[in-house]
Image: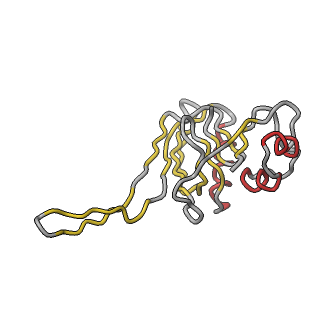
Amino acid sequence: MKLKYKEFEFPVNPDSIEISSSSNCSSKPVFGGNSNVENVSVNPIIVSGNGEFFGESAREYCACLQNLLKRKESGWLFVPSSPPVKAYFTEFKFSRNTKRNSISYFFVFTEECSDRKSERLFKYTYAEKDENAFELANRCNVSVNDIMRLNDFKSPFELTEGDRVVLR
């Protein structure tokens, strides 16, 4: 599985991907010299990483990522070996190495927490050959509206075989 954000799929996975989760705790002293600790809030998940794009397409990949960053709207981030995260693209840096004909990059995605539930059950499937959103919705017993809302598809007929489709 390759790293994918909205419609952009990285041609090769980044060299490193770091996923950071944390929470804020409050500690109050109690009688007897002990403390009472409780979890006050959960911070957004941060996904960061770096890698290199090579060859003639490297500039095009950077331009696509810069355009995604400028949109200032959240979308689904698919990270290898991790559940999908609805996130904002919050940082992108790159530098060109002319000797290697490559561009090194660094990125940061920050989880959107406005509708975070205490526990999310992520469920997704893969589109089958010649399947559209209507057929997929019928096969998976979900609404077409949910598929369109959760996946940034412009049309219900945009699916191609192997696309990851978030169902809830």
The percent coordinates of residue 41 (x first, y second) are 41, 64
Identify which residue, 37 or 83, lies in the foreground: 37
- What is the total number of numbered labels drawn onto the structure image? 0
In the displayed structure, does residue 31 sit left or right of residue 48?
Answer: left
Identify which residue, 26 or 31, lies in the foreground: 31
In the displayed structure, does residue 41 sit left or right of residue 61?
Answer: left
Residue drawn at x 14%, y 69% is 31
Residue drawn at x 86%, y 36% is 131
Identify which residue, 141 or 46, lies in the foreground: 141
What is the quadrant of residue 72 in the picture?
A: bottom right
The percent coordinates of residue 16 (x first, y second) are 47, 36
What is the quadrant of residue 42 in the picture?
A: bottom left
Identify which residue, 19 or 60, lies in the foreground: 19
The percent coordinates of residue 69 (x first, y second) are 62, 56
In the displayed structure, does residue 49 sit left or right of residue 57?
Answer: left
What is the quadrant of residue 90 in the picture?
A: bottom right
In the displayed structure, does residue 117 sit left or right of residue 164?
Answer: left
The percent coordinates of residue 25 (x first, y second) are 32, 62
Residue 21 in the image: above or below residue 164 = below
Q: How is the image coloured?
A: secondary structure
Residue 34 in the image: above or below residue 66 = below
Residue furthest out toward the front? 32
Residue furthest out toward the left? 32
Q: Quadrant of the N terminus?
A: top right
